Image: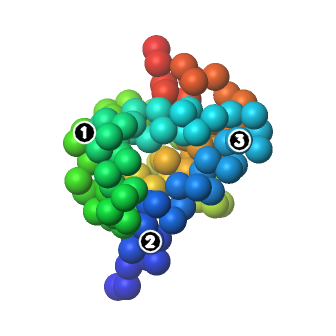
Amino acid sequence: MNKHRIYTTSVAGVYPHYVTKAEKKGRTKTEVDEIIRWLTGYSQEEFEAQLEKQTDFETFFAEAPGMNPSRNLIKGVICGVRIEEIEETTMREIRYLDKLVDELAKGKAMEKILRKQ
């Protein structure tokens, strides 16, 4: 089975779209970065290094220092697919990120986006 094209797409190629989506709705690049750091465990410096290296999504998530255990609380539909039903791990991680950025753009509070109890 062939891998989905997003796996070999660089995070740096998609990241500006995440930022633009957030900024169009009055949110900030800093908030997008916070979401990414929360999800993956990268520090800001490590994240920026991944962007600089043009790391693809598959490697980005495989090398993440510590995926947040609360990410399994992220539920809902993204691109017509229910996140909790995605079996392939890397695709599910990508969709978690997409969903978090969507929630940010929709004006949801950071505490709720970051699943703080």
Q: Which residue is drawn at 48% across and 47% down?
A: 96
Label whose residue precedes the other's in the sequence (3 or 1): 3
Q: Is residue 3 visible?
A: yes
Mark linked to residue 66: 1
Q: Which of 69 and 111 is in front in this view?
A: 111
Residue 68: x percent and y percent? 33, 35
Mark linked to residue 9: 2
Mark 3–mark 2 distance (CA, rounded to whole Å): 22 Å
Q: Nearer the viewer, mark 2 or mark 1?
A: 2
Residue lying at the far right of the rendered structure? 25
According to the picture, the residue beneath numbered tag 3 turns out to be 23
Q: What residue type is labelled 3?
A: Glu
Task: Decide if residue 5 is on the left or right side of residue 89.
Answer: right
Mark linked to residue 80: none
Q: Nearer the viewer, residue 49 or 100?
A: 49
In the depicted structure, whether residue 102 falls above or below residue 69: below
Q: What residue type is labelled 2?
A: Thr
Mark 3–mark 1 distance (CA, rounded to whole Å): 27 Å
Residue 13: x percent and y percent? 51, 65
Q: Is residue 86 visible?
A: no
